[in-house]
Image (cartoon, rainbow, N blue to C red):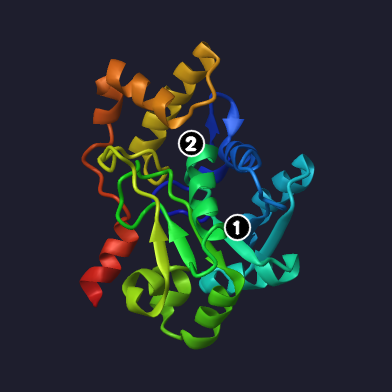
Amino acid sequence: MGSTRLPGKVLKRLAGVPVTRQVYSRVRRIPELDEVVVATTRSSKDDVLVAYCEREGIRILRGSEDDVLDRYYQAARVLKAEVVMRITADCPFIDPRVSHQVLKLLIDDPDCEYATNALPRTFPDGLDTEVVRMDTLARIWGEVSDPRYREHVTYYISTHPDRFRVRSVVSPVDYSHHRWTLDCPEDYEVLSRIAEVLRRRGQFGYLEEILAILDERPEIAAINRHLRCNEAVQELEREK
């Protein structure tokens, strides 16, 4: 709830549905997941999110606000997870089929420690899925102390690819110029318009359905086209 660019974004509504509910419902449709949990902070700012999740029957665990790596690790320990999928709450149009491809890539390859569809980025920003083995997550948690790597859960993997066995799901068509994440007011305008079209058409909002909408209505995508992908990580790269 503590976003500076778009405060309270995870409970904003898209076609009448709170973003947290939309993300949770979509993630629940990903095959082979045993449990879905919201991992939020202990900050009082997130009390309203906790109250919402409790009312909705959504399991929620709380942890450090700044040490996000520890928050994920501790949540995974509580769940006794062997594999952890990371999907952030600013991805309301996460596609269960795309996310399942990432999960299968890791599950089907015993040597794979980390799988993603964002390295390289070929899917729209907002469909990001990461899957990491618990022992790999524990290894990072135990080895890393730099605050940059503690705040951004898997940033250490992406900057040290030689230390991990990484595999990627790559789209046959490069859609990386699309921005479907929720970070700024312009993003909210784009996602709201897409959600309304999906509601009117009775569509779920799979990748190809949203692409079709934007092909028909290019003015929607133009609203946030000037914004950059993964600004926080790009800022970290400049600081290195």
Can you tell which mark lies on residue 93? Answer: 2
- Amino acid, disc 1: Lys
- Residue 45 marker: 1
Task: Residue 42: tell me if it is visible.
Answer: no
Q: Is residue 43 above or below residue 217?
A: below
- On the picture, is 26 further left or further right than 193? right
Seen in the image, is 39 located left or right of residue 8? right
Which one is nearer the viewer's eye here, 66 or 83?
Answer: 83
State left or right for residue 15 relative to residue 148: right
Alpha-carbon neighbours of circle 1 within 10 Å: few (<14), some, or many (≥20)? few
Name the residue rendered at 62%, 56% in the picture.
46
Indicate the amino acid at tag 2: Phe
Q: Quadrant of residue 175?
A: top left
Residue 63 in which image quadrant: bottom right
Q: CA distance from mark 1 to mark 2?
A: 25 Å
Q: Is residue 155 visible?
A: yes
Residue drawn where x is 48% and y is 29% of the image: 206
Considering only order in the chain, which callout, 2 or 1, is on the residue closer to the N terminus?
1
The x and y percentages for residue 140 are 50, 80
